[in-house]
Image: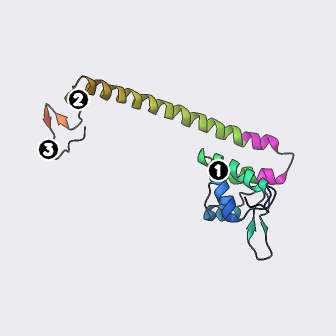
Amino acid sequence: MTTTETPADPLSIGQAAERTGLSVHALRFYEREGLLVGPVRRTAGGRRRYTTADVDWLLICVKLRESGMPLADLKQFAELVRQGPGNEAERLQLLDAHQQRVEEQIEALEECRSVIAWKVGVYAEHLARDEAGGLWDPTVRDGRRAPGSRDTA
């Protein structure tokens, strides 16, 4: 921030990109697709200027997209917010459904992490006992390595 810039000063597209973690291209895409809740202000020369409210909204959008919200749902959510008061139940329904999907993803990832942790433990135990040769190798059949298989342990 320069000495003449205040937190309320509008941001350039580059500054908004830096603050949100989005690329300049992504910011233009979000605007084109109607994902912003208000029009992006522009200078007399046509350069985009983002407010703190724009950046705050974009940060929410980033988290919703990072957590897997489909673009169509994000568009619908933005449209509902743009419409103003009176549709909060619809917004809640969208967010509730997304939260449920995220919870299911977290549960699936926890199961994956559990299997990986178990496998790490198996390898660590075998290596600590200097028994790495006893680890399962899917390329070995009847005590012999399958033809054309690589050493993949």
In primary-sequence order, the first of circles 1 and 2 is: 1
Q: Which mark is residue 147?
A: 3
- x and y percentages locating residue 21 in the rendered image: 62, 54
Which residue, given by chain and number where applicable, does mark 1 sit on?
A: 62
Residue situated in front as seen by the camera: 23 or 105: 23
Q: Which mark is residue 132?
A: 2
Residue at mark 1 to residue at mark 3: CA–CA distance? 49 Å
Question: What residue sits 78% from the left and 54% below the top?
Answer: 52
- Quadrant of the frame with the N terminus: bottom right
Residue situated in front as seen by the camera: 95 or 36: 36
**Within 10 angstroms of label 1, few (less than 14), some, or many (20 or more) residues?**
some
**Within 10 angstroms of label 3, few (less than 14), some, or many (20 or more) residues?**
few
Would you say the residues marked 2 and 3 are in contact, meaning their CB atoms lie under 8 Å apart? no
* Vertical position of residue 63 compared to residue 131: above or below: below
Q: Amino acid at mark 1?
A: Val
Q: In the visual, does 103 lie left or right of 147?
A: right
